[in-house]
Amino acid sequence: MNTPVNSAPLFAALDAEAAAALRSSMVEVKAKKGAVIFEEGEPGDRLYVITTGKVTLGHKAKDGRETLLGVLGPGEMFGELSLFDPGTRTATAVALTDVKLLGLSSDSLRPWLTGRPEVSLKLLQALAQRLRRTEDAMADLVFSDVPGRVAKALLSLSDKFGVFKDGELFIEHDMTQEELAQLVGASRETVNKALAEFVNRGWMRVEQRSVTIVDLERIQRRSS
Ligand code: CMP
């Protein structure tokens, strides 16, 4: 079965039998939209793979400003950092929609890491990809303007949540405009202005908690 969960880094290196064995040591966790799954600063000893729904990972700066580090969907993993580097959670995880997760404790994970090096390699690859994306996002904060960052964030969301319908790209991101602004790292006003400009140019439509990209080429050009 090729469900998004089976393609998660944790399972990707395993055959069906081993993946089923690993799944049997995981516990299902359900969270309602808006529920806090864990908070930044808490000790953590469990990683999660999303089965259904979306999760935001957020960070609060000392001055109280909140930023979103990412929005994750089915098949994606979070909460692994405090397992590999024992310590406190580096971000707060919140259910953006109702979610179902599979949780794996560090005790259950360890035998898989030592007995199946291919699992460790896949997890390292996932961490390396995240590091690249974080570095990319930091460079964008310095070198790209807000409309460019908005275009880029929407394209990144479309990779996970986008669906082509009648030649248009529909992206149900489930975020409020404030959350979208936190993801882009700009004020709500500037992000709204950028979105309004894209709409005025006929490049997209903005609906509540979703956008529809009408002219993908223009958005791609604006993002680079
Ligand atoms: P952990 O520190 O255990 O809890 C918070 C989780 O958020 C962390 O593990 C990672 O899984 C995830 N995380 C932290 N920083 C980022 C980031 N920049 N992008 C995406 N996910 C992140």
Image (cartoon, rainbow, N blue to C red):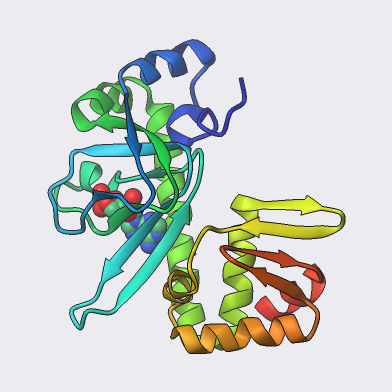
Indicate the position of residue 203 as horizontal and vertical percent values. 78, 76
Above or below 14: residue 189: below
Please say whether residue 144 is visible from this viewpoint. Answer: no
* Image-quarter location of ligand 1: bottom left
Q: Which residue: 48% across, 79% down?
A: 139
Q: Does residue 12 appear to the left or right of 21 in the view shown?
A: right
Q: Count of labels shown?
A: 0
Above or below 141: residue 87: above
| Front residue of 87 and 67 | 67
Q: Which residue: 48% across, 68% down?
A: 176
Q: Does residue 210 appear to the left or right of 87 in the view shown?
A: right
Indicate the position of residue 39 as horizontal and vertical percent values. 21, 55
Q: Which residue: 18% across, 79% down?
A: 62
Q: Which residue: 23% across, 76% down?
A: 61
| Front residue of 129 and 34 | 34
Indicate the position of residue 115 as horizontal and vertical percent values. 32, 20
